[in-house]
């Protein structure tokens, strides 16, 4: 019979060479930004960012009254027992499952606008 050796088992070394192999030798180096090392000032970006901020803030401010008006319209449609309302060019559609409402103005088609204009020359 053959005797088994009792002793150290082979182990992966924890040196820098094995660390490179595990992390990848071609990994890009991450460099930290030092304080005071900001991007150079680009006037066009600064100006356009300021315009965007103003427009974004106006849109967000206008959203609050719009949300209340939408909720009031949903309540009014439910109180009237309507899921769809159409009168003239106004079209209101209530989606109960999603608690949402769609309001649109229907543009007059060409045939409808000609009929409404009162052009009697074709009739006689």
Image: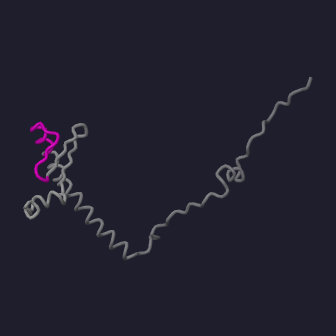
Q: Farthest top residue?
A: 1
Give the residue displayed 16% in from the left and 45% down from the top: 71
Give the residue displayed 14% in from the left and 53% down from the top: 89
Q: Farthest bottom residue?
A: 43
Q: Give the mark count.
A: 0
What are the residue bounds of the magenta stretch? 73-89
Q: How is the image coloured?
A: one colour
Up the image or down, 41 lies above or below 87; here it is below
Q: Split into 4 quadrants, where in the image is the C terminus?
A: bottom left
Q: Is residue 14 left or right of residue 5?
A: left
Residue 103 at x, y = what percent? 18, 50
**Depth check, front residue: 29 or 60:** 60
Q: Farthest front residue?
A: 124
Residue 123 at x, y = what percent? 9, 60
Is 118 one of the magenta-colored residues?
Answer: no
Residue 68 at x, y = what percent? 15, 49
**Depth check, front residue: 101 or 122:** 122
Q: Split into 4 quadrants, where in the image is the N terminus?
A: top right
Give the residue displayed 64% in from the left and 51% down from the top: 23
Give the residue displayed 25% in from the left and 40% down from the top: 98
Is 76 one of the magenta-colored residues?
Answer: yes
């Amino acid at each position: 019979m053959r005797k088994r050796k009792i002793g150290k088992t082979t182990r992966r070394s924890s040196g820098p060479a094995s660390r490179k192999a595990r992390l990848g030798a071609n990994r890009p180096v991450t460099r930290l930004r030092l304080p005071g090392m900001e991007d150079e000032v680009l006037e066009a970006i600064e100006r356009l960012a300021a315009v965007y901020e103003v427009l974004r803030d106006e849109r967000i401010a206008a959203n609050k009254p719009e949300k209340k008006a939408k909720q009031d319209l949903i309540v009014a449609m439910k109180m009237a027992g309507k899921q769809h309302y159409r009168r003239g060019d106004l079209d209101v559609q209530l989606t109960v499952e999603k608690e949402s409402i769609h309001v649109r103005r229907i543009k007059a088609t060409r045939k409808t606008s000609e009929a409404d204009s009162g052009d009697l020359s074709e009739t006689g």
